[in-house]
């Protein structure tokens, strides 16, 4: 019988298998751990950029690249919009070829690209593709009825839907709010403009794009009149096929400019039916909201067995549509309630959720702060989104003083006030951050976990169980989603424990996984 406690990181690194997996260029071939930074609230690297509002900036990201690489094994970085914009979140872009001065301007961004690449970290840019701000030069010229730009947006003489706003006697279409007028991709010049924007950034070294609001490029059926389909978030009333055609062309054109460019679409929908079709068009990746919900709901209910089988069905479907795809796994992001809050601030359940997300095949994304166990639930006031965009808890003076544009405070909620900051968590072997450090070390460095095939196994209702196999080596991955220990029966003859989050004893035919515990065991194929 073998007894083990959680492996020290040095020991874990030595234990990692090194089989198979020829290294190639590009995010799709190299990266399995991504990190999302909400720039305003991550880290302040230059107070001179603050412009009377203390906030994060790109220099703050640069200052912490070693932290991200050394402690979270980050391989690809996605920053929320960094272009010049009048809002704190940046999703209404004034100028696609700019970097916001409060974030440090173009000099800081190009330095970020250089410093990230030095550390083997790829950088993805947030591409807001379906709308601009009202201050964008394109919209100002369109509003002034300049011939070349008039049809960059959708104007009508009457208000045919609720999502139209009057300006200078006519109405423009803006799905999300009046400050974000939608671009008109029926005009080929708009498409060419956006492609040139992408080329501009790829020439500077950007490795790919996270495409915002991908299912809303076309919200209408041009053959029947745009008023029929506008203003809906339902797939049945969106022009889904037109969006698929758009991204088929967009993906091909991006790859012509850079064969290794990586496109990840945000198709914000809880069903894979909303985003699976995009894979068939050659898209590299989509954020997987269905599996996020599966992990959180089943961990919360102690029914982990459901997760692996659900994921197997999904991956088989996506692989049929695009064998070269790389699914993007998430637990949180800047637009949805944090995983910790969804699990009622249960740290151990959140660790189990993160373990499943990291051990499944795909590109696993960490939203900054989840690795600290931060909470965040949207509230009902006008600044409700700030709740899941609270400042990263470094443990310095900026923790409680980051201010949003317009003077709106963004202080910690009760849970976040109580958690330990990053510096303290790194010294605590039982902390959320120490757990993330261990599990990401496994995913980034063990080629069986990084590149291996996947097969679900039924080993009890509470246990999310599956194998990962590569070049004749097979690991059995076990995550107990119950708050009680779960016994697992399996042939562990000559089994070797690669990783365990909590102490376990390995017998020849069984083991018991502690509550919310994780184990990765090398077994016979």
Image (tube, rainbow, N blue to C red):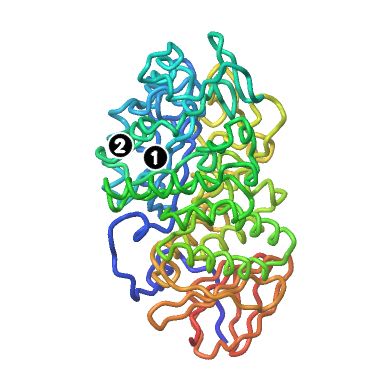
Residue 209 is drawn in which quadrant?
A: top left
Between the C-alphas of marks 2 and 1, the distance is 8 Å
Q: Secondary structure at mark 1?
A: strand
Of residue 15 and residue 471, the one placed in the foreground of this image is: 471
Q: Is residue 304 left or right of residue 473?
A: right
**In this rendering, position of residue 363 left or right of residue 30:** right
Q: How many marks?
A: 2
Describe residue 54's horizontal placement relative to residue 347 as left or right.
left
Q: Residue at x 49, y 62 (%)?
A: 439
Expressed as whole percent of the image width and height from the top left, the position of residue 391 reads 54, 34
Location of mark 1 (residue):
125
Residue 396 place in picture, x, y as percent: 49, 33
Q: Which residue corresponds to the image point at 49% horizontal and 55% vertical from the top-left? A: 328
The residue positioned 43% from the left and 23% from the top of the image is: 151
Local SS, label 2: helix
**Residue 1, x across and y down, in percent:** 57, 87
Q: Mark 2 = which residue?
A: 201
Label 1: how many Cα within 10 Å (few below 14, some 14–19, many 20+): many
Above or below, 202 relative to 84: below
Could you say where residue 178 lies in the image, as x and y percent from the top left?
A: 58, 21
State yes or no: discs 2 and 1 in contact (Cβ < 8 Å).
yes
Between 251 and 446, the one nearer to me in the picture: 251
């Amino acid at each position: 019988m073998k007894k083990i406690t959680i492996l020290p990181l040095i020991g874990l690194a030595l234990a990692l298998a090194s089989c198979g997996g020829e290294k190639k260029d590009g995010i799709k071939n190299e990266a399995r751990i991504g990190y999302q930074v909400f720039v305003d609230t991550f880290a302040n690297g230059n107070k001179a950029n603050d412009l009377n509002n203390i906030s994060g900036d790109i220099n703050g990201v640069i200052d912490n690249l070693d932290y991200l690489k050394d402690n979270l094994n980050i391989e690809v970085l996605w920053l929320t919009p960094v272009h010049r914009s009048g809002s704190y979140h940046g999703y209404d872009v004034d100028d696609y070829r700019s970097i916001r001065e409060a974030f440090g301007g173009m000099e800081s961004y190009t330095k970020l690209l250089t410093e990230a690449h030095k550390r083997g970290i790829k950088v993805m840019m947030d591409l807001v593709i379906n709308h601009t701000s009202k201050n964008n030069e394109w919209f100002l010229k369109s509003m002034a009825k300049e011939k070349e730009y008039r049809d960059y947006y959708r104007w009508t003489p009457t208000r045919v839907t609720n999502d139209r706003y009057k300006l200078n006697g006519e109405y423009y279409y803006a799905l999300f709010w009046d400050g974000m007028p939608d671009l008109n991709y029926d005009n080929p010049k708009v498409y060419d403009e956006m492609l040139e924007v992408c080329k501009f950034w790829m020439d500077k070294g950007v490795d790919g794009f996270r495409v915002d609001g991908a299912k809303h490029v076309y919200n209408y059926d041009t053959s029947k009149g745009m008023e029929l389909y506008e203003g809906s978030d339902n797939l049945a009333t969106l022009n889904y096929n037109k969006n698929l055609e758009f991204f088929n062309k967009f993906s091909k054109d991006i790859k012509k400019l850079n064969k290794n460019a990586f496109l990840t679409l945000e198709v914000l929908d809880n069903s894979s039916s909303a985003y699976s079709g995009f894979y068939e068009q050659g898209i590299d990746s989509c954020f997987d909201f269905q599996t996020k919900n599966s992990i959180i709901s089943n961990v919360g209910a102690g029914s982990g067995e459901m997760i692996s089988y659900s994921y197997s069905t999904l991956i088989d479907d996506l692989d049929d549509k695009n064998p070269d795809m790389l699914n993007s796994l998430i637990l949180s992001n800047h637009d949805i309630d944090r995983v910790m809050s969804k699990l009622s601030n249960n740290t151990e359940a959140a660790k189990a959720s993160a373990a499943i997300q990291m051990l499944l095949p795909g590109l696993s994304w960490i939203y900054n702060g989840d690795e600290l166990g931060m909470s965040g639930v949207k509230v009902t006031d006008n600044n409700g989104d700030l709740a899941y965009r609270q400042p990263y808890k470094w443990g310095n003076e900026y923790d409680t003083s980051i201010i949003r544009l317009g003077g709106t405070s963004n202080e910690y909620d009760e849970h976040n006030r109580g958690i330990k900051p990053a510096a303290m968590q790194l010294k605590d072997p039982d902390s959320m951050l120490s757990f993330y450090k261990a599990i990401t070390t496994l995913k980034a460095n063990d080629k069986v976990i990084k590149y291996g095939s996947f097969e679900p196994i039924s080993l009890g209702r509470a246990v999310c169980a599956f194998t990962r196999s590569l070049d004749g080596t097979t690991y059995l991955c076990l995550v107990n989603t119950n708050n009680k220990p779960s016994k697992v029966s399996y042939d562990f003859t000559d089994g070797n424990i690669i990783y365990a989050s909590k102490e376990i004893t390995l017998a020849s035919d069984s083991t018991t996984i502690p509550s919310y515990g994780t184990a990765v065991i090398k077994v016979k194929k």
